[in-house]
Image: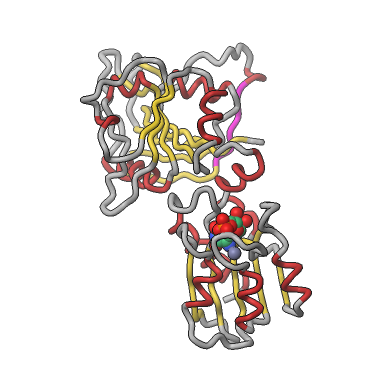
Amino acid sequence: MDQSALMSRADDLSKFGLGYTAPNPIVGCIIVDSNNNVIAEAFHNGGPHAESKAINSIEVVPSDATLFTTLEPCDHYGKTEPCSDLIIKSGIKNVIYSITDPNPIAQGGSKKLRDAGLNVTSGVLTEKVKFTNRYWLQKIKTGRPYFTWKIAMTLDGKIAALDGSSKWITSVESRGDVSKLRSQADAVLIGTGTALADNPSLNSHNIDSRQPLRIVMGKSEVPASHKLNDESAPTHFLKSHETTDLIELLSGLEVNQVLVESGPKLGTALLKHGLIDEIVAYIAPSILGSGSSFVGDLNISSLSERMDYQIHSFTQLGNDLCVTLIGRN
Ligand code: AOF
Ligand code: ZN
């Protein structure tokens, strides 16, 4: 296996940490021997750093081993001793990492390793790893979390029929995928309109999965009998319609990614404020013609003012098409 393939394996591993690590990144690490056989693998899940888990999982680290990590090893005393020191102590001579750590308090590990005489290579598979860590990178660089808007709609962009019926537009496979998205998100956001109309739990229904924080935005009261008032997940009721209040609330929470599951009102407000970084659209091959559209008026009158997203990936789920779109910024 070449360097990219081994880094790709570390990148895949890191994704097991999604939902568990905020405010920290997701990180995958593998150690290979001189024949490129994997002798250790680990991912960060909110506890010790991935590098330390990988090193500590093997009794004797061969000195000709190579450590692959998706993020530059840290050089600071946080929850544990610096990974840079740990790697030097382990006797490993070769370190390959993908992305440079932009976190000012933790960065500097690569210099420490080079100064200690280790062979350090960076920049392997960076586009892929940057994408995998897009939530944390966004939070650390801009101070606000990454917003992913999930929409289940018909081919003509409707999320409910005229009589309000909306269960179910998309297939059971798509709904299972939404459950996975929830288990990987740090927080799920809806407006009180959707809360009152649908009485959703916003839980991930995957067995053993963690539950994201729930944020309900709007001035209406959500009755105590509603599922959002149950004990299944911590819930914040933000009695405001202002996105600035939302950003302020989020800045005090350990949230890297927000999964937006709102209706058109809140979704449109976030879109207008340039806050929708990604759209995951589950599109059923059905046409309603009338009913509620997923998005409201954006004050756009000419094609030249349209909001463009880029297709990142698409897949068929049951009878639906699932498209992931990324903002251009
Ligand atoms: C992680 N997991 O596997 C790596 C990290 O809060 P601390 O002390 O755990 O330090 C967090 C910083 O350490 C984090 O923002 C990142 O810059 C660096 N590396 N963090 O949580 C890991 N390798
Ligand atoms: Zn570390």
132 left or right of 108 in image: left
Q: How many marks?
A: 0
Which quadrant of the figure contains the N terminus? bottom right
Q: Where does the image place residue 98, in percent across and percent down from the top left? A: 65, 62
The residue shown at (67%, 82%) is 93
Which residue is farthest right? Answer: 115
Which quadrant of the figure contains the C terminus? top right
| 260 w.r.t. 192: above or below | below
Depth order, front residue of 315/145: 145
Q: Where does the image place residue 212, in percent across and percent down from the top left? A: 38, 42
| 283 w.r.t. 181: above or below | above
Depth order, front residue of 40/129: 40
| 162 w.r.t. 195: above or below | above
Q: How is the image coloured?
A: secondary structure
109 left or right of 269 in image: right
Where are the magenta residues, as a range? 306-311
Ligand 1, what quadrant?
bottom right
The residue shown at (54%, 71%) is 52
For the question of whether residue 318 can be seen, the reply is: no
Residue 128 found in image quarter = bottom right
180 left or right of 53 in image: left
Q: Where does the image place residue 76, in percent across and percent down from the top left? A: 65, 62
| 282 w.r.t. 289: above or below | below
Q: Where does the image place residue 175, in percent across and percent down from the top left? A: 31, 40
For the question of whether residue 307 can be seen, the reply is: yes
The residue shown at (47%, 57%) is 46
Look at the image and say whether residue 318 sits in the magenta stretch: no
